[in-house]
């Protein structure tokens, strides 16, 4: 029997539309109210657009829209119809909003404040759009295509491209502006991660203990978290062992370690960060 895919409801589409709109507006605010008036550029197409706007005196929104279109056409087959439409919509909203805000006075002429608040708002805006299935910069599409061809990580390709963007900013504006721009981009990059992955970061925990049954039961009883046994074989003594695997929140991690060490103070515990948890039932069971 074929498995049917769950279709998005009108409420899902509405939520996607609202948050992409908010994200695009926030990026436009960051650019026109904080960064551009203080000669601070963003990375990617936005940075190139800011420099071209400075050189030609044409509105920033025109370059943001026109320069992104070729990348969307180029990557249409790779990124899919839904992503393309979402990205085109987000870029359109961003471009129109920048044009509308072009003559609004800057909130501050203090460069450090512009870097901090501009980077923060920019990161929130871009993060929202990415989280809800879109993008606001065609450089990401180029990076994906180049990554498939040359086997380089997408992140490294974006970084290399942005190095040239910030060098260009040094010539178009000043080298001080280029250095401020790097800090603004770094802040935005970190905020994007928080918005996309969430503050409530999860941890995956692997436990090796001779008291595996008691440890697993204690985790379920005292933390309310499900556990999974993974059968394995020791590499040195070749003995059969059972590992315990579970996923907990960051706040529960200390309590989990206490529970394990109370039962077996020689237990091996390996902890890894989990950016997202999908499927299954991550909700806590009732704790008795």
Image: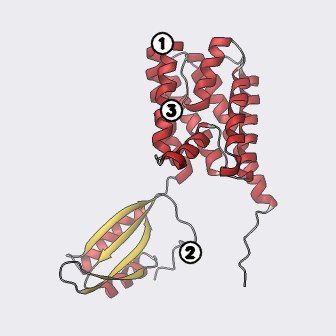
Residue 27 position (above or below residue 110) = below
N-terminal of the pair, mark 3 or mark 1, is 3
| Residue 107 can be seen, yes or no | no
Residue 105: give x, y in percent of width and height: 67, 16
- Residue for point 57% across, 46% down: 144
Identify the image quadrant of residue 92. top right
| Relative horizontal placement of residue 247, taking residue 105 as reference (left or right) | left
> In the rendered image, which residue does mark 2 sit on?
280
Camera-side mark, 2 or 1: 1
Q: Residue at horizontal 46%, vertical 77%?
A: 224
Q: Which mark is residue 161?
A: 3
255 above or below 130?
below
Q: Earlier in the sequence, mark 2 or mark 3?
A: 3
Instruction: Indicate which label's residue lies in the foreground, 2 or 3.
Output: 3
Where disc 2 sits, the SS reads loop
Nearer to me, 236 or 248: 236
- Report, in whole angstroms, how far the alpha carbon at label 3 lies from the one at label 1: 19 Å
Name the residue that disc number 1 marks.
174
Numbered disc total = 3
At label 2, counting other C-alpha atoms closer than 10 Å, the crowd grade (few under 14, some 14-19, many 20 or more) is: few
Residue 267 sits above or below residue 156 on the image: below
Q: How is the image coloured?
A: secondary structure
Tell me the SS state at disc 3: helix
Secondary structure under the numbered disc 1 in the rendered image: loop
Residue 204 shows in the view: yes
| Callouts 2 and 3 close, C-beta under 8 Å | no
């Amino acid at each position: 029997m074929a498995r049917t895919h769950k279709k998005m409801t009108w409420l899902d589409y509405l939520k996607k539309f609202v948050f992409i709109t908010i994200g695009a507006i926030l990026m436009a605010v960051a650019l026109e109210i904080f960064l551009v008036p203080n000669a601070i550029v963003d990375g990617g197409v936005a940075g190139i657009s800011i420099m071209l706007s400075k050189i030609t005196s044409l509105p920033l929104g025109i370059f943001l829209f026109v320069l992104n279109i070729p990348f969307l056409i180029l990557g249409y087959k790779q990124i899919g119809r839904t992503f393309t439409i979402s990205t085109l919509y987000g870029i359109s909203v961003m471009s129109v909003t920048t044009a509308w805000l072009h003559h609004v006075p800057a909130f501050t002429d203090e460069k450090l404040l512009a870097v901090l608040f501009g980077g923060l708002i920019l990161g929130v805006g871009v993060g929202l759009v990415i989280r809800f299935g879109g993008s606001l910069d065609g450089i990401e599409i180029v990076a994906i295509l180049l990554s498939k061809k040359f086997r380089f990580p997408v992140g490294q390709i974006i970084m290399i491209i942005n190095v040239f963007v910030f060098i260009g900013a040094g010539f178009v504006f000043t080298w001080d502006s280029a250095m401020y721009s790097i800090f603004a981009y770094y802040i935005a990059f970190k905020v994007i991660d928080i918005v996309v992955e969430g503050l409530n970061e999860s941890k995956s925990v692997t436990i090796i203990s001779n008291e595996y049954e008691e440890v697993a039961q204690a985790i379920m009883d005292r933390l309310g978290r499900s556990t999974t046994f993974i059968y394995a074989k020791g590499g040195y003594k070749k003995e059969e062992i059972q590992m315990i695997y579970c996923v907990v929140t960051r706040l529960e991690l200390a309590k989990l370690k206490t529970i394990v060490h109370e039962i077996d103070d020689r237990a091996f515990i390996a902890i890894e960060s989990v950016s997202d948890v999908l499927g299954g039932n991550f909700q806590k069971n009732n704790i008795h």
